[in-house]
Image (spheres, rainbow, N blue to C red):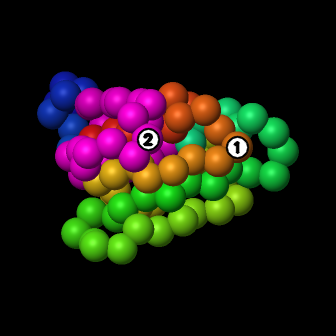
């Protein structure tokens, strides 16, 4: 078994979504932390390799999303720093 940093199936770099609407970033997967209220979180993102943004709704606390994105456009019902991007 190799070292943690050599495992391709684990994220080794994590950043927060505190720069909503900022410039694109390296392709990253998404983790959604604690929402502000019941009903789930809504985020709007730009998927990697796409030109059209996508809104994902009803995301529950503590969810890893099976999507790779390059930009966080908007968030609803969550503080932006509770959205994590990992690669």
- 71 to the left or right of 24: right
SS type, badge 2? loop
**Disc ID at residue 20:** 2
Whether residue 30 is visible to the viewer of this picture, yes or no, is yes
Mark positioned earlier in the residue sequence (1 or 2): 2
List x then y, in percent, for residue 14: 34, 30
| Residue that badge 1 annotates | 77
- 78 to the left or right of 65: right
Sort mark 2 into few (<14), some (14-19) or many (20+) by Cα contacts within 10 Å.
some
Taking 69 as reference, is 8 above or below it? above
Q: CA distance from mark 1 to mark 2?
A: 14 Å
Specify whether residue 14 is painted magenta.
yes
Magenta stretch, overall SS:
loop
- What residue do we see at 84% from left, 45% from top? 38
Res 86 quadrant in image:
top left
SS type, badge 1? loop
Specify the segment rendered in magenta.
Answer: 9-31
- What residue do we see at 25% from left, 49% from top? 24
């Amino acid at each position: 078994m190799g070292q943690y940093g050599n495992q391709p199936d684990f994220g080794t770099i994590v950043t927060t979504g505190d720069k909503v609407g900022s410039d694109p970033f390296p392709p990253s997967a998404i983790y959604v932390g604690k929402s502000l209220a019941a009903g789930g979180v809504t985020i709007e993102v730009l998927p990697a390799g796409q030109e059209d943004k996508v809104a994902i709704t009803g995301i529950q606390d503590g969810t890893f999303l099976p999507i790779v994105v390059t930009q966080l456009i908007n968030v609803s019902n969550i503080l932006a720093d509770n959205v994590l991007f990992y690669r």
